[in-house]
Amino acid sequence: MQKYIISIDQSTQGTKALLFDESGSLMKRTDKSHSQIVNEKGWVSHDPEEIYKNTIEVVKRLVEESGIDDECIAGVGISNQRETSLAWDRATGTPIGEAIVWQCARAADICDRVEKMGEADRIRESTGMNLSPYFPASKIAWILENVKGAKENADAGKICHGTIDSWLIYKLTGGRSYKTDYSNASRTQLFNIFELKWDEYICKLFGIRPENLAEVCDSNSKFGDTDFEGLLSHPVPIHGVLGDSHGSLFGQGCLYQGMIKSTYGTGSSIMMNIGETPVLSTHGVVTSLAWSMSGKVNYVLEGNLNYTGAVITWMKDDLKLIQSPGETQELAKEAVTDDSVYLIPAFSGLGAPYWDSHAAAAVLGMTRTTGKAEVVRAGVECIAYQITDIVKAMSEDAGVKVEELRVDGGPTRNSYLMQFQSDIAEAVVQVPDSEELSGIGPAYAAGLALGVWDESIFQKLNRKKYEPQMDGAVRNKKYGGWKEAVSKVLTTKQTEGF
């Protein structure tokens, strides 16, 4: 009988269900968006019950529309938006308020309080990450401090709190399983990535009881069984769980030290597998766990960018320079070759590796020959420059020369951008023929654990290859011009050493 793996990809905007056959081919996809709840203070929330109901719905449609025999479903994998945090009643599974989305900074005051205690360095040295309201530690603390009855019930052991993966596992297993995986745990700012356990000291700083956090398991372990509330005729095991960026890294086959991937979306996540030994960055990126598979842990360096694909959207919607993203490719090719325009997309400051929240966006280096095509090209090229900054930072931290960059996401369809990325990073760029990498990762993990396929599955993706073609002197001049342009918008001196 044919065997199938279902992968649930629960993201910031919506939930997908993906069906893979035993050859690893994607057979069917269903999806549904959920509400983005933004109040007058700019707080961003999601309804946990809506996310769970949508998960059941997209799986139901997947099974019905594909026409497969549900007896052939071997297992389930889950990827999730990572830092989004919530709490729920341990006995009833009822959410305690809304989920606080990773984008939401309502817990900034809690981080300020912890920083004034002089604990920021201790937190970074244990968790690999700078103290920030971006991470679940302060978000969960905010729930406990601000939702009526939450703190008292937590003290009595009646509360579960964590990330979306643990919520879905709990609900899909009917409350029988309260677990998370190493990749998600490492992004909470509560997990000691060196000792591989919840850090009791840091938990106490945020007023969180470690015993109320989920059990941390290997990313390919069995997380429980589900029949999707009676949809299936038999329970199937949930056997692969990864945060979405980690899922993409695994799906790309970046299994060994020095392998690196970049996801091009609204923003970008760049991750490098640094092997079994953690390295704390001195070049402006963070350290996390990639995963733990069958007891073997891998670590990553990660850098996140706010404005990559969003630059193209800005040029289309706000500047009206283009009518569709596809136009950027031809305009970039038409631009004057020697024009030296640089666009610095610091619309909300600059993230990794500069970390200057006060930096301002700018277009620099314009001449009389600068026109629409040159500005559009600068917008495209700034994506590659930013990613190269992070690739170089990771290379310095890990002591590894990056020879190859595996990429995914919508902007990778732009051949000009991909060739320029290869030229500026001086690395081979590999573009797969699938855009579902965050869902492919946990599917592969589940299928490997269940014996549906072996590691040859990582050869399943077809890839288009871009190789460096730019003259070295030209590359150095262009990248040097970028660094000089960035230096003009910085308000700090955190770029020393990059």
Image (spheres, rainbow, N blue to C red):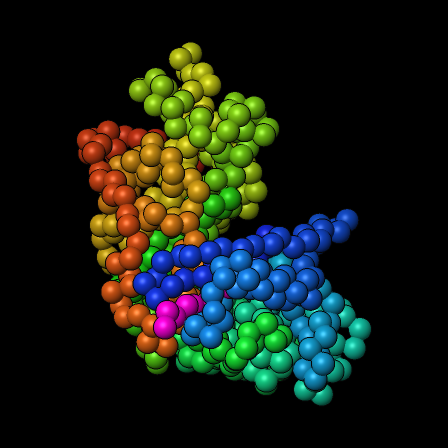
Q: Quadrant of residue 331?
A: top left
Image x and y of residue 164, in percent: 58, 67
Nearer to me, 225 or 389: 225
The secondary structure that dominates the magenta segment is strand
Residue at image position (62%, 59%) is: 101
Q: Check the image and name the residue furthest to the top.
A: 368
Q: Is residue 289 visible in this depiction of the protein? A: no
**Direction from residue 125 to residue 30 in the image, left or right:** right
Residue at image position (75%, 51%) is: 39
Q: Check the image and name the residue furthest to the bottom.
A: 156
Residue at image position (58%, 64%) is: 60
Q: Quadrant of residue 336?
A: top left
Image x and y of residue 300, in percent: 36, 63
Nearer to me, 489 or 417: 417
Residue 25 part of the magenta-drawn span:
no
Residue 4 part of the magenta-drawn span:
yes
Nearer to me, 413 or 72: 72
Region of the chain picked out in magenta, as a range: 1-9
Image x and y of residue 171, in percent: 62, 75
Is residue 252 placed above or below 208 in the rendered structure?
above
Q: Is residue 20 visible in this depiction of the protein? A: yes
Q: In which quadrant of the rendered image does the N terminus lie? A: bottom left
Residue at image position (45%, 61%) is: 19
